[in-house]
Image (cartoon, rainbow, N blue to C red):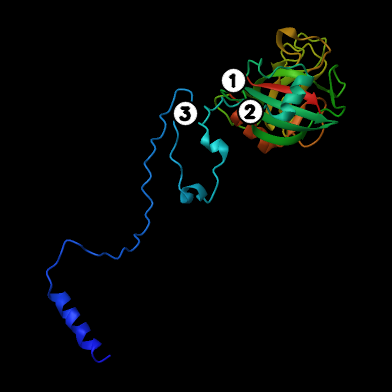
Amino acid sequence: MKRLIPLLLSFLLLTACAPRTDTVILIATPEPQTTPARAATPSPLPTAASPEASPVPTPAQATFAPTASVPQESLAPAASPEPAAPSEQPPLLDRLAKERGVSLDGLSCEQLVLVAASGSSCRLYAYERGSDGIWSKVLGTSGHVGKNGVADSKREGDKKTPAGLYALGFAFGHDENPNPDYPFRAITQDSYWVDDPDSRYYNQWVEGATDKDWSSAENLGRIKTEYALAVVVEYNYGSSTVAGKGSAIFLHVGSESTSGCISIPKSDLKSLLKWLDDSKSPHILIASE
């Protein structure tokens, strides 16, 4: 053994000092296996028959949703507004006018007073027509009609108020005229309204008794309270007057049933007179509710 050690050392020394040759001894180590890169496959071109493909969303895109859904109708384009339907006429006025055969659209007047009677009591409303043809209420109050209510058939002295549509004539009274623009006649002690069917002045205002041919007439000068203010209802009036069919139908001051007139509180009648406009041809519609 002692002899081998010097021999090994000599071999190693000789080997280290010997010139190199072309022969190289390599100890092979396995290389890491790498997957060859896959060649990119071109995406097919869109054809006329199929729509262009959209990029595939990433998982984040695919799972994203807005916190609040948008109503479907808000996504549609706004429709152009349709013309607004005309407003309805006042229900009570519309109903009673139809029952009386009166067309609100066909009226030539622009001011209308409605008397809606129940027995000898009534509700009174004043309406004005707008540019759209709709009647709007401007005044409302309660009042009274004839002791025997409202009737289609009226005779002198029956204490009934005539139903129907009539023009409103001039105003009159003991008080000052509250509306200088509306026709008004002041009462004197010699003012009469004739209710005698046999008189040529039947259902007319007469000043003085020089040509008196009547046996019955209202002396307006003596009726201070009711005729403080009043408006003529042109029933059986003017050229169409029929003897005995009824006379002296007024809208006047009062708080109880009448002999055929319509009575309302003085303050309301004064307001009504201030509102009346002769150029708007005011009318009155009298009906039972």
Q: Earlier in the sequence, mark 3 or mark 1?
A: 3
Label 3's element?
loop
The quarter of the picture where residue 118 lies is top right
Q: Quick one: label 2, few (<14), some, or many (20+) residues within 10 Å?
A: few
Q: Is residue 49 left or right of residue 133?
A: left
Which mark is drawn over residue 280?
1
- The nearer-to-camera label among 1 and 2 is 2
Q: Residue at x 77, y 24 (%)?
A: 96
Query: Which residue shows up at 74% across the image and 29% down it?
Result: 92
Do labels 3 and 1 touch, CB within 8 Å?
A: no
Q: Can residue 248 be seen in the rendering of this structure?
A: no
The amino acid sitting under disc 1 is: Lys
Whole-percent x and y of residue 222?
74, 29
Q: Whole-percent x and y of residue 132?
A: 58, 23
Give the vertical position of 60 relative to 207 (above or below). Answer: below
Sequence-first disc among 2 and 3: 3
Image: 12 above or below 164:
below
Would you name the residue on which mark 2 appears?
87
Structural crowding at the residue carrying mark 3, measured as other residues with C-alpha within 10 Å and reported as few (<14), some (14–19) or many (≥20): few
- Total numbered badges shown on the rendered structure: 3
Q: Position of residue 282 (x, y in %)?
A: 64, 21
Identify the mark at residue 51; answer none if there is no mark: 3
Q: Is 116 in front, or is 33?
A: 33
User: Measuring 23% from the left and 88% from the top, which residue is drawn there?
Assistant: 5
* Cα gap from disc 2 to disc 3, whole angstroms: 52 Å
Mark sitting earlier along the chain (1/2): 2
